[in-house]
Structures are given as structure tokens and as C-alpha cells.
Image (cartoon, rainbow, N blue to C red):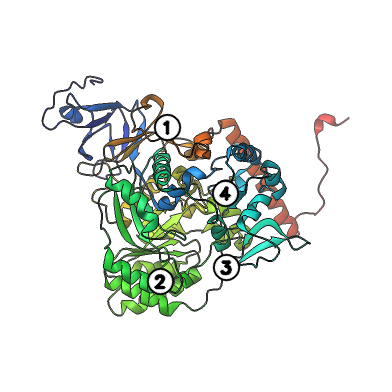
Amino acid sequence: MPVGGLVPRATHDAADLVVRNAKVHTGDPGRPHAGAIAVRDGLITAVGDDRDVAPYVGPGTQVVDALGRRVVPGLNDSHLHVIRGGLNYVLELRWDGVPTLRQGLAMLREQAARTPRGQWVRVVGGWSSEQFAEKRLPTVAELNAAAPDTPVFVLHLYQSAVLNRAALEAAGFGRDTPDPRGGQIVRGRDGEPTGMLLAAPSALILYSTLAKAPVLDGADRATSTLHFLRELNRFGLTSAIDAAGGFQNFPDNYGTVIELAREGRLSLRIAYHLFPQTAGQELPDLARWIETVRPEDGDAWLRLNGAGENLTWAAADFENFAQPRPELGSYEDEFEKAVRLLMENGWGFRLHATYDETIRRDLAVFEKLAADGLFPAGNRWLFDHAETVSPASLDRITALGGAVSVQNRLSFQGEAFLRRYGPGAAADAPPVGAMLARGLTVGGGTDATRVSTYNPWVALHWLVSGRTAGGLPLRSRENRVDRTTALHMFTRAGAALTGESDVKGVLRPGCYADLAVLTEDFFTVPEPDIAHIESVLTVTGGRIVYATAEYTGLDEELPAISPAWSPVAHYGGYQASVPGSAGARQAGLLGEAVAESGRHRAWRVERGLLPDAVAAPFDPCFVL
């Protein structure tokens, strides 16, 4: 298809795909900008302008006119529960991006009416009460009114879940049901469960309750996973590092992505981790896996990246910021054995660690092993989350050859963190500036799908702006990053965490042809609108895996969503919102200025610098 003078003339070395008339951010310091890209056999063969790619256009080359849009390397979420998310995607009613609780309840009511008997309506992650205009959770009474007979489970972050009467019955909760360790079943005056479950502080009560809901069979699991990957492609994601997680057993729950990889049907590259599921059995599980598979086993689409994000259950802290920081018992002995086993056998790992108190204890174990030459030893390892990591701990991580992956959990939990730890701690949670200043590899991620949304642009907005999903500015200027750095964290840094820097995260000849054509220019769009960016065309390995707008129909056909009553079949996934107008942004800034003025006045009154009395309003227009 000749476009703009690109006449087909190549023969033996013709490109499969050419993207032209674009504003390409390559991520390659050697050539940061370009206007066109040529792709052959899944790899980039040329980057430049029309003159550079013209020799690669043949009769069978698909030429895509980007119409002057911004093109970026395909995004890479360095901490996404993509395998677990795919197995459940079509069963979940997503409130990601829903602006009001009223709309969310209307969706829930409609979904309950079409959900067959025996199935649940489940709202699982990707939202926060702070994103709603009402600034609150749904009540049990509202869930009972919306779905009197259909079980409804609504998960709110790592903090709580709200169940209607039918869900309490389906889950088997009654007057005599004991509270599990680390969790609370809220009860009324009569001793009966009210429908509220609290993580106090462990989220196990929330996840174990959700696990009682029906699951999909094999064929529907594959369909669900394909549609979830397509949904991720919608936002320009072409890679993800799966962080494993609770209730994700190996190899059983990995079977779907393994089969899709064998069939060549994955549209997202996945590097996965293995997470021991049974407390007390962690070392035997790790030893068995070491004998079975090796890190980097697999191919460009599906590969093992190591162990974690837990190695031993006792070493995991909890991230419910509505509750006090958990005090962990002694765990170092078993933890040291697990780390030694991995490092001696060439395995990397990632560690869930929210608090500096946990990180310091882990580092003490690593430093002990360093005396035996096991750190730094070339194995890739990292801390995940690290909201309260200290400068001293960052120095120790650097010395031991580690890395960090940060997620925008405080987009959704920021207000709770602020209330518990104060504005000073919130300004440094996590201290991204200090991490980057030490030269650490810092990957960007979401921790979707049960806390944050899987939309990476919400995370990119948080990295740049420091604001929560409710618009509250929290993080200091030192811990916000410029847009180029934020994009680097979601591209090149993720590739470094999987040992693929030579082929992924940049757009240059010889690298994977993974790219996204964006709805808006990430580098120039007003800051509040970063979160509204999507992709109009996503390419993974030279395949067009998502296409909309002018490109509708160019992507690969997917099987119909099954079951037919699926919430995704009716509402889709992320609920796209309209970027705010300049006037609305100006009004919001004025509102913040007024609030800031009020806080300053209160500060002065508290210190006796102003009288406590509030002066009556004065308007000279009404002076007689």
C-alpha cells in the first residue's frame, strides 16, 4: 500500500510492517527521535525518516500512517499479577476509572440481574473510594438493595471487603464463624456478621473469601486471559513481569499462559516468578523448582525470571495502611536458607517489602551471605514496593547489587497513608528520587489487579504529578520524576529487571518490534490528562495486537467472551474517562489554593500569630 510516496520496491528484504509519519520517541540515546520504523520477522530493521524506511517497503508490506501521533516503545509493567488477573478477568466487574459510586452501583445492579444462579458478582481491585465523587465505600444495605439474591463481593484495596447478605451465606459466614488470624469479621449487636470484612492487618481473609467464588473452566480461562491481554494492549503494554502471588500455584495456574505461548497466541511478553504457596513448605518447593526449571528458561514471549515475591511467608509484611505496621516475628533462619539456596543455584528473586523495618532485616541476612561471596553475585534481585525505605537501606541495596520496583499503590492508598504517617512520610513514599540518585535500576509498575488499576498511565501520572487518584498532592518534588524518566521506568528499566536490555525497551534496529501509537502526546499533554492516554495501535513482535480509531480491524480476532453474561462483555474493562477541560483544571487549582490558605491561617492561629476569631465578610458593594 503506497502511502505518501513510499512506492513498493523491496524484494528479498521487504519489511512486514512500516509505521511512518510519526513522532517516535525511541528511548535510544544514540537516536532519540525518528519519524518512521520498519519491522521484519518481529524485529526492528530500520529507524529514521521516510527516506530510511523506503527501501524496505515491498508489495506485501503493511504501511501504517501514524498521522503525526506520538509513538513510544511498548510499555513494560514491572509488577503486574497478569497470570492471576487473566484467569479471572471476564468474571470481574471493574470499577477502574468509574467516577461516581452511583454509577458503580448502577453497574452492579444491572450485572446482578444478568448473573445466573450460583455465580457471584465480584468487584476486585483497581479502584478507591477517593476516586468517587461521594468519597465513600458502598454500604452493605446498598449491596443488598442492588442484589438481594445474588452474592456480591466488593474488595477495597488491601483494607476491607463488603459482602451482601447472599454472599455471606454463600461464603459460609455465620454467628459461630471464628475470625481468622490477622482478619476480622465485623459483627452486629446480635453477633451475626454484618457484611464487612477487615484486613487487620492481613489481607488473607479477603483473598480466602474471594477464593470461595466459582472459577472458570479450561476453555474459558484461555478466553479470559486473551481478553485481559488485549485489554492491557489497549494501554500500550507489550510486556509485563508477573509477580506471582497468593492462590497462584505452579504449575497448575500457569497452565493457561503456557498453552497460549505454545500456540503463539500471547499478545504480551510475560516474565514470571514462582511463589511458594504453603507456609512451612517453602524450602522444599524452592528446591523442587530449582531441579525442574531455570531462570530465563522459555523464549521471548514467556520466560521464568526467578522466585518471589515471597520466599517465606513469615518474612512478608502487609500493606494495609489503615492499620498499624505489622510486627513480624523471627523469620531470619528459614529466610536465610531460602536466599542461600537461590543464590547458590543462580536464581534471582524479588521480595515484597513495604516497610524499612522489614527491608533492614532482609538486608542483614544478605550482608551475612555476602561474606560467603553470594552478594553481589550477578543474580538479579530486587525489592518491591519499598514505600518507607530509608537512605541508609538504599545505600546497602546499592552495595549488594540490588534493584527496586515501585508501584503506584499510593494512588489509591495515599489518603490512608497520610492519615497514619503524616505529610513528611507521604512526601517520600517511596523515595524515587533518592533511588535514582544512587544509580539503582528502578522499574515502574502497578501491582494490579487487586489494588491498583492495570492502566499504566495512571501510574505514570502518579510518578510525574505525585497525586493520588482523588487528586491529592502528596509526594515531594524530589520524589516526582520528569516524563522521560517515568517512561524509562516503564520501558528500559523493566527490560533490565529481566535481563533483556539488549532487545527490549528501546526502538532501534535489532530490538523487538514492540511499540504503541498513543491517543495523546505523553510529552506535551497537560499533566492531569496523562492518566487518560491510551493506545490507538499496539504492536508486539511486529504483530498488531490492538487497533482502534482509524486502525479498527487491523488487530487479530479474538474468540467471543465466554460466559456470555460476563461483566466484561457488557461494560468492557477500564472505564475510559474524558480529559478535564482547562477551565475545570483552573478551578481545581484555585480550590487547592484556597484550602492551602486555610491551612496556613490555622497554623498562624495555633501559634498565636493571628486572633482565633474569624472576621465577618466584607463587601464594599453593600456599604451604605
**Could one spot residue 576 in this view of the protein?**
no
Residue 34 location, x and y as percent? 27, 34
| Proximity of marks 2 and 4: CB atoms separated by less than 8 Å | no
* Left or right: residue 201 compared with residue 140: left
* Left or right: residue 425 compared with residue 441: right
Q: Is residue 622 above or below residue 442?
A: above
Instruction: Name the front one of labels 1 and 2.
Output: 2
Mark 4 belongs to which amino acid? Pro
User: Could you give the CA–CA distance between mark 1 and mark 3, rounded to whole angstroms?
Assistant: 41 Å
Residue 61 location, x and y as percent? 21, 27
User: Could you give the CA–CA distance between mark 2 and mark 3, rounded to whole angstroms?
Assistant: 24 Å
| Proximity of marks 1 and 2: CB atoms separated by less than 8 Å | no
User: Could you give the CA–CA distance between mark 2 and mark 4, rounded to whole angstroms?
Assistant: 41 Å
Relative depth, front residue between 177 and 546? 177
User: Could you give the CA–CA distance between mark 1 and mark 4, rounded to whole angstroms?
Assistant: 26 Å
Q: Secondary structure at mark 2?
A: helix
Relative depth, front residue between 431 and 506? 506
Q: Which residue is mark 3?
A: 325
**Crowd class of label 1 (few under 14; some 14 to 19; many from 20; radius 10 Å):** some
| Proximity of marks 4 and 3: CB atoms separated by less than 8 Å | no
Q: Which residue is mark 4?
A: 473
Mark 3 belongs to which amino acid? Arg
Q: Which residue is mark 2?
A: 282
